[in-house]
Image (tube, rainbow, N blue to C red):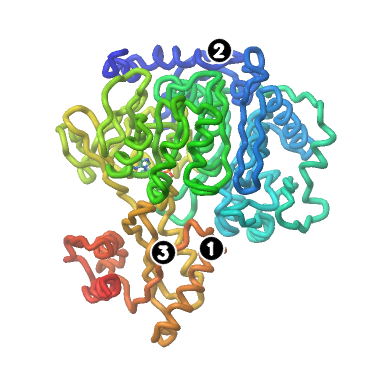
Amino acid sequence: MTNYAEFHRRSLEDRDAFWGEQARLVDWKTQPQQVCDYSNPPFAKWFVGGTTNLCHNAVDRHLKDRADQAALIFVSTETNQEKVYSFRELHAEVQRMAAVLKDLGVKKSDRVLIYMPMIADAAFAMLACARIGAIHSVVFGGFASGSLASRIEDASPKVIISADAGSRGGKAVAYKPLLDEAIRLSSHKPEAVLLVDRGLVLMNLVAGRDHLWAALREKHMSTVVPCEWVDATHPSYTLYTSGTTGKPKGVQRDTGGYAVALAASMKHIYCGNAGETYFSTSDIGWVVGHSYIIYGPLVAGMATIMYEGLPTRPDGGIWWSLVEKYKVTVMFSAPTAIRVLKKQDPALLKKYDLSSLRALFLAGEPLDQPTAQWISEGLGRPIVDNYWQTETGWPILSICKGVDDSPTKFGSPGKAVYGYNVKLLDENTGEELKGANQKGVVAIEGPLPPGCLQTVWGDDARFVSTYWTTIPGRMVYSTFDWGIRDADGYYFILGRTDDVINVAGHRLGTREIEESISAHPNIAEVAVVGVADQLKGQVAMAFAVVKDMTLVADEAGRLKLEGEIMKLVDGDLGAVARPARVRFVTVLPKTRSGKLLRRAVQAVCEGRDPGDLTTMEDPAALQQIKDLVTE
Ligand code: AMP
């Protein structure tokens, strides 16, 4: 086994040689001339001069050795479908989709927005964009019209690909009306909408704009669409994520750096080999879905399972039955999902043959010790926590199993991953905290390694001001997470430094939810905070000031208004963002300068000491909240 400290040191100190070697894990049309150009910090350009294609690396290059091996395994317990696509079949489907996109006028660098459920066609769509050099922007299917509209506005897609409906718990969830409303709300209008008709919900097609995928596909059954060779720095996709302001940021990823980062992570972190099967339970709407449902496993020549359905339907053994059936070697999920499974019959963990499985990786939110212990004992397999963000695209902290035989520690996502120069910094002074067990902001010294965001889509200034200038006195990337590091170099993540909350592994900005609630005609002002929850990690709690308090004078009035607000958020952002409760107050706790004291509200909701309140304008405001939550 490699000496990991040395491996990590080399990745930073001998950066170009290290990443130059990793670059050999992927195919290039033209070899890169320069490994890293960091002449204009904090903008890093990786593999400059190289040309490549993500779809070629994920699909075409495997045709030589494994054309008839499984590539994409689509399983839906919602519609009871199961279909395995070999690399050859995937190659054909992706070309059909690419040909259709070209017919619809999509060219290199055009944006294509994908708003789809977890069906195989969504994978074809992503890969087809990569194939022709178009930039995809996948929007999570659980988001509603408001969220979708702001993403359409920002990405200005030429074409949108969607479907009649998703399905959850056996119930169809119509997508098309939400999409139509989002397009109506957005000032940017796509030229065309391509729709997959699953036969779940009737669709009203808009003449001249809407096209059915099945009909256009027919014309291209044997069309050959060659890969467009693009610069390593050509954007492959944007993915919107929440921050402290209401407007989501389009995380922009390159092509060459991303391909190399994923290929290297499959080797050093996930230890997945060509010909094996990878199973990530995430959704294509999230970063894990991009990196470890679609691109990572396929770039490594692995089959990837795309699963539509709940982890508990038909019963809590469904995932493990897939592990047995498809001989999954690497699995990736989120702590929330495991906490859901904990409520199921534990015998289901023992019912299937899981001998193929080497490890279960968990990420997206803090992994609590009881959950980690329960699943590790139940499966009898190593559990590896890894910490990262939409922005980075692959792990920042982990135990890199392929090059490090150090044990995992409960509660810790591990050590700094190669390529990441992770530091803990004092929030106020920017000073580096070098000692063990000191709490600081988790920061990364530039350049960020390959695969991380290049910039914020269309807004370089926002990229710099959001991520690189928040720590006084230095230009360093802030993760906006608190952390500590023990004497062995293991990090522990202690929560966000900003107003971002994490509900069941889904990252949400409290400001977005506040903006949505404020649109209600009877709401004057609102504060949304994330409150600890046993199952979901955190849930959103809203405290709203009502314009006319007589409306909430009795329980019936309060429930009515609470219901209206929840419906409003559902329709605007989607049910994922719906607050667990909306409580009504006459005033919100603020500083004398008018800043909302969200952290104090959160502390009170969690039964903790709200800390120093000397700057608070009206102490009675916090007392009202205390009374409500201890009622
Ligand atoms: P997202 O961009 O949606 O993946 O959310 C990233 C955020 O989720 C991070 O900044 C952390 O706050 C949290 N997070 C992700 N993975 C972990 C982990 N393994 N442990 C603790 N927090 C995590």
Residue at the location (49% across, 48% down)?
312
Q: Which mark is residue 289?
A: none
Contact, mark 3 vs mark 2 (Cβ under 8 Å): no
Q: Residue 411: where, in percent of width, then height? A: 26, 39
Q: Quick one: 517 or 166, which is closer to the camera?
A: 166
Q: Amino acid at mark 3?
A: Ala
The residue beneath circle 2 is 31
Q: Which mark is residue 570?
A: 1
Above or below for 596 versus 29: below
* Ligand 1 within 8 Å of the CB at mark 1: no
Contact, mark 1 vs mark 3 (Cβ under 8 Å): no
The residue beneath circle 3 is 580
Instruction: Single out the mark in the foreground, 2 or 1.
Output: 1
Instruction: Single out the mark in the foreground, 3 or 2.
Output: 3
Above or below for 530 versus 271: below
Q: Amino acid at mark 1?
A: Asp
Left or right position of 354 against 629: right
Task: Please rate how many residues cluster around mark 1, counting C-alpha atoms within 10 Å: few if below 14, some from 14 to 19, many from 20.
Answer: many
